Amino acid sequence: MSLRRVPVVLAAVLVASCTTQQQPQPAPSAPPPTPTTSASPTPDPKALEKFTAQKLAWGQCAGFTDKAFDCAKLTVPLDYLKPDGETISIGVLRHKAKKADQRIGSLVINPGGPGGSGVSAAARIAKSRPAATLATRFDIVGFDPRGVGTSEPKLVCLTDAERDADRAEDSESDTTSGGIAKQLADAKAYAAKCVERTKHGQEMLANIGTRDVVRDLDVLRSALGDEKLTYLGFSYGTQIGTAYAEAYPDKVRALLLDGAVDPELDTAESLVTQMAGFQNTFAEFGKWCAARQDCALGRDAGAMTKAFQDLVRPLITRPAPAGNRELSFEDAITGTSAALYSQDAWKFLNDGFAELKRGSGKTLVALADSYYGREPDGRYTGILDVYFAVRCVDSARITDRRVIDGAHERMYQGAPFLTGGTPDMSELDICSVWPAPATSEVHKPDVEGLPRPLVISTTDDPATPYASGVNLARDLKGALLTFEGAQHTVFLDGNECVDGAGFAYLIDGKLPAPDTRCT
C-alpha cells in the first residue's frame, strides 16, 4: 500500500518546482473528509490561565527577510487535560496593521490542509494586492498548527527518501486479500514510524486533531490581546472555524469560511461527494480544453475521460521519464487532481498532457510535487504526514470491508476519470490501525449565541462541493455568498464582488444580502 495518495482532499499548493514552465498560483488547501469538534472533557479554564495570560515575545522571523513581519512562539499544553504536563510551542507570524489608528484587531488565518502553514499563508496574504484593505485595518496573523512547520515538535513519519520511494510504488490496484493485507501491514509500519520519529510520539498523535488546534487558537486569541476572535479559514480551515464556533461561540467577533467542509457528512459520504466534485471540474476543464487548438486530450469535450485514461493508464507498467525521476500512474493522477483546484493551472495541466504524449512526465511530476509539499531540493514539508495524523483522530474508524468497498464503487461511479488511481484502500481504513483513538465525531454543530458568520461557496469547487457551503451556512445560521466558478476557494483571489463582500463583513460586520451571487 502506498500511503502517499490522499484522494484529492489534501493541499494543492502549487509552488515553483523543477519545471521551467510558468507555475500556477498557490491555492488554499483542501480539507479532510470528516468534520470534527471536541468529544472529550472540557479543560479547566483556571488551570489554563498561565497559558492564556502569556505575553508573546515578538522578534525577527527565521526565513523571512521582510522586516514587516515579526514572529513568536506560543506555549500550549501538549494535553489540555494535563495543563501541568508537557508543553509544546506554536509558531506565529504577525504583520501589523498599516494604520495603527484604524486598527480593529487581529485577523487570524488558516489556509487549510490539515498540514498547511498558517505562517506562510499569512505572510503571502499580508503582502498580496487583494488583501491590502485588510492589511490596513488588521494585524494579519498566521499560526502553524501543532506538528506543522515552525511549531515544535514537528510531526515526522517518513524521510524524504522514503516518501519518494513510496510515491514511485504503484500498488493500490492490488485489491486481492493478499494485497489488502499488505496495505494494512504497511499502514501499521507507517504509524509506528510516526510514533518513533516524533518527540512525545504517542501523546502527540493523540492530541494533534482539530479539537486541540481549536484550543490552541483560543489561547492564541487571548495572547494576542483580542477579546474576541476574527478568523479567516479556507477549506480545512473552515473545519477549524466551525469547531471553534461550537467550543467558544461567545468569543467570536467574525468568522469568514471559504470552501466549506460539510459538518454532517461522515468519511465515506464526504469522499463520495468530493470525488463527484472533481469529476465535475474535470468536465469543465474538458470544455475549456476542447475549445483550444492545442488541447492534448482532443477536441471532443465528451470524450475527455477516455482520452485521459488512455494517456495515463500505460504508466501503471511503464512509468515515464521525468528528468532524473519517473512519473508513476499515481503521480499522474495526483498532479492532474492538483491542477483542477484553480483555472490558473489548466494551461499548465494541458501542457503536461502534451508533454506526456511526447514521452516526458516532468510537468505532471512537478504538479504532484507541489501537492505533496516536495521542495525543488527534494525536501518534503511533511504536510502529508500531518494530514493522516489529524484525519485519523478526527474521524470515526471504518473497519467493515463492505462499507469500504461500497464507498470505493460509488466513488469510481461518480469520478470515472480517476478510475484505478484514487482513492486507494488506505484512505478509508488506514485509521483502523492508527495508534491513537478518535477524539471527535460527526454531528450537527451546536452554536447557540454565535454571531452570524459568512460562508463562501463556489459552484464548481472540486474539493469542497457547493452543497457543503450551503449546508455549513445553514448549520451555523450564517450568510451564504455564492461564487459561480470552477476553482477551490475564491476570497482574496482578486474577484471584486467576493472580496468586497468579505471586506464589508470582516471590517464592519455587514453581511451580504440573501442569495447574493458573484461571477
Image (cartoon, rainbow, N blue to C red):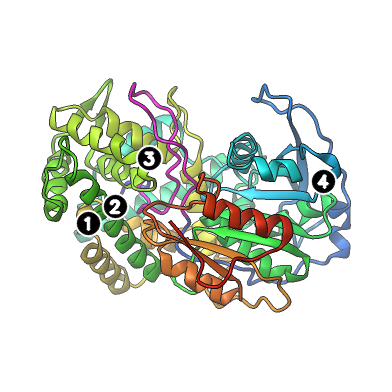
Q: Label 3: how many residues lie within 10 Å, few (<14), some (14-19) or many (20+)?
A: some
Mark on residue 178? 1
Q: State which quadrant residue 409 falls in.
A: bottom left
Mark 2 / mark 4, whichever is N-terminal? 4
- What whole-number distance in Å separates the C-alpha atoms at marks 2 and 4? 60 Å
Which residue is under mark 2? 182
Q: Amino acid at mark 1?
A: Gly
Q: Is residue 421 left or right of residue 212?
A: left
Magenta-drawn segment: 5-30
Residue drawn at x 81%, y 46% as measured from the top left: 103
Quarter of the C terminus within the rendering: bottom left
Which residue is under mark 4? 102
Q: Nearer the viewer, mark 3 or mark 1?
A: 3
Q: Amino acid at mark 3?
A: Asp
Please provide percent x and percent y for residue 309. Answer: 15, 48
Q: Nearer the viewer, mark 1 or mark 4?
A: 4
